[in-house]
Amino acid sequence: MINQQTLIIGANSNIAKALVDQIQQYSNVGLILISRDLSDYSQIDNLQKITVQDYQPETISATVERLSRDRLKPITQVFICNGILHNSNIQPEKRLEELNAQSFQQVIAINALLPMLWIQQLTPLLASKSPCKIIVFSARVGSINDNKLGGWYSYRASKAALNMMLKTVAIELARRAKNIKIIAFHPGTTDTPLSKPFQRNVPPEKLFPCDFVAKQLLAITKKTEVDGSASYLDWQGNTIDW
């Protein structure tokens, strides 16, 4: 019998799909998926699927309002999987001369601002007596202390900005929504289209399949306590320096 729900935002990503495969094995957990493209789930009936046209603030607000109307069981986990590293117009900068204002703004908007817009709208819905953990995909390169190689200006900056906002919102939620735990998660180098152009120098044992990352993430989420602070964790569950 379903007594809790997991919400996955950006459910078309490869890691999100692996999370769905794992969570479907739990008979007591319902799944709510949000994405611009949910066609890969068309043959699966026991899911609540919400397709959105975009991730503009108005769309996010309307989507959360729909969740509020439809919710039957408490949402105890939220995975925010949206992110960008590269596309046909954007590549990580190797040199200062490659920094581009338009690309920077796009990377910041997707990686840093978008997750916070979801948290902003979801907080009134999630605040309750039921523990709820919000997991946002960050990256180790967002750590200022860990930056030894340089480069990747936009991506590093976007994840550092995300981390700062996640730590800040955790402080606020400790006062007004004590049941919510914020986790910034670094999945490691995962075998997905996002990392494909950068896998050449990655040792095989450090290139993780999505199902492995999903299992690790679910185990880490389960054992992480709701403690009124933000956690910045890697795929092993180890703490990363902010």
Image (tube, helix red, strand yellow):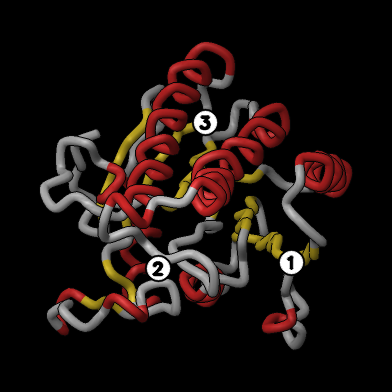
CA distance separating discs 2 and 3: 21 Å
At label 3, the amino acid type is Ile
Label 2, secondary structure: give it: helix
Residue drawn at 60 percent across, 61 percent down: 28
CA distance separating discs 3 and 1: 26 Å
Q: Quadrant of residue 36?
A: bottom right
Residue drawn at 72 percent across, 47 percent down: 73
CA distance separating discs 2 and 1: 21 Å
Label 1, secondary structure: give it: loop
N-term-proximal mark, 2 vs 1: 1
Can residue 185 be spotted in the picture? no
Can residue 129 be spotted in the picture? yes
Badge 1: residue crowd in 10 Å (few <14, some 14–19, many ≥20): some
Badge 2: residue crowd in 10 Å (few <14, some 14–19, many ≥20): many
Q: Which residue is mark 2?
A: 214
Q: Which residue is mark 1?
A: 36
